[in-house]
Amino acid sequence: MSKNVNAWIKMLYLGLTFGLSLTILKIILHTVNDPIWILFYQSTFSSILLLAFALFSKSNLSALRYNFGALALLAAFGVIVPNIALYVSAKHISVGSMSLLLALIPFFVYIIALFTKIEKLNALRVFGLALGFCAMFLLILPGRNLEIGIAKTWLMVGVLTPIFIASANVFLSSMRFRPIDPISIALGMNSLAAIVLAPIVFITSTSPFIFKSAGLSLSVLSLSVITSGGFIIFVNLIKKHGPVFASQVNYLVTISGVAWGFIIFSESHSSQFWFALGLILCGLFCVRPNGKKSMM
C-alpha cells in the first residue's frame, strides 16, 4: 500500500470516528445527564490507554514531571473547560450543530495567533476568517433558529469549546517544553484532568462508581478510544505529511458529524444551517496552514 493511500485511509478514519464521537456523546447524555461524570471517566480511560501506548512505545514518562505547569494549563484549557462546555450544550443542540461549532477551532486559532504575533496577516486567511464568523453568527444570532425550539444560549455556551481549544492549541504550539513527546503530552493532559475532576465527581455524583448498563460502559470506553487513538494518528499524520495535509481532517469531521446525526438521530436542518456549513467549509479552505512551519 502506497504512503499516500495509507495517509488518506488514516484521514478518512479520523473524519468518520471524530464525527461519530459526537453521536456517541449524544447517546451517553440520554442515559447520564452529568457532563463532569462523563468527562472524568473519559479522561481516566484515555489516560490508561495512553499510558499503555507510552509504555509500549518507550516514551520518556519522566518528562511529565518537568513539564507539570504547562501540562496543568493544557489540561484546564484543552480538556476540562472546553469539554464541559461542549457536554453541557450537547444535551440541547444537534450533532450537526456540534460539528459546526468544532469546525470553528481553526478560525479562533488564527485570531489568537494574530494577537500574539505568532502568525501574520494574510488576505486569504482574513477572508476565510470573515466567512467563519458569518457562519458563527448564523448559529447564535436571533432570528430563525437552526433547530426549532432550541435556546440560543446553549449554542453560545458551545462556542466556548472552540475558543478554549484554540487557546490550548496556540499555547501548545508556542510553549517551549522540556524534551517531551506528543503521547506524553496527551497522557499528562488527560491524567491531570481526571485528577482535578475526581473529587468533584465523588462529591456531586450519587453513584460515582456505578455504570447504569454495559452499553453505557462501552459508549464511554469507545469515546476514550476514539479521542486518545485519534490523537496518536493525527500526530503521526502531521509528522509524516505536514500540517497542511493533516488540517484537512476538519472538513471530514464537520461533514461526518452532520452525516452521523442524520443516520443515527434522523436530524434535519434548515436552509440556514446548510448555508452556515457551506461558509465554514469555504472558510476552512482559506485559513488552512500554508507550510510546515505554520502552527495551524
Image (cartoon, helix red, strand yellow):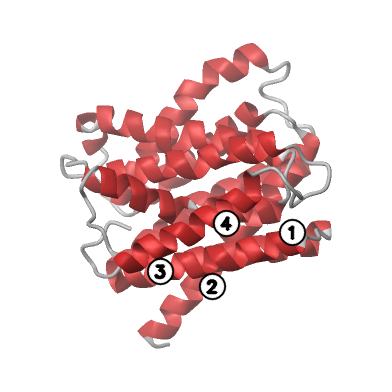
- Nearer the observer, disc 3 or disc 2? 3
Where is residue 149 drawn, in percent x and y? Answer: 83, 42
**Image-quadrant location for residue 253:** bottom right
Amino acid at the residue labelled 3 = Cys
Q: Secondary structure at mark 3?
A: helix
Q: Are marks 1 and 4 in contact (CB under 8 Å)?
A: no
**Residue in the image at 49% along x and 45% along y:** 162
Q: Is residue 28 above or below residue 123?
A: above
Left or right: where does residue 183 sit relative to residue 41? left
Left or right: where does residue 112 sit relative to residue 89? left
- Alpha carbon distance from label 1 to label 3: 26 Å
- Alpha carbon distance from label 3 to label 4: 14 Å
Residue 135 is marked as 4
Amino acid at the residue labelled 1 = Gly
- Nearer the observer, disc 1 or disc 4? 4
- Nearer the observer, disc 1 or disc 3? 3
- Marks 1 and 3, the one that precedes in the sequence: 1
Give the crowd class for mark 4: few <14, some 14-19, many >=20 residues within 10 Å: many
Q: Is residue 165 visible?
A: yes
Circle 2 residue? 12
| Quadrant for the C terminus in the image | bottom left
Q: Are marks 3 and 2 in contact (CB under 8 Å)?
A: no
Residue 261 is marked as 1
Q: Secondary structure at mark 4?
A: helix
- Alpha carbon distance from label 2 to label 1: 17 Å
**Image-quadrant location for residue 41:** top right
Circle 3 residue? 286
- Marks 3 and 2, the one that precedes in the sequence: 2
Q: Are marks 3 and 4 in contact (CB under 8 Å)?
A: no
**Residue in the image at 78% along x and 63% along y:** 262
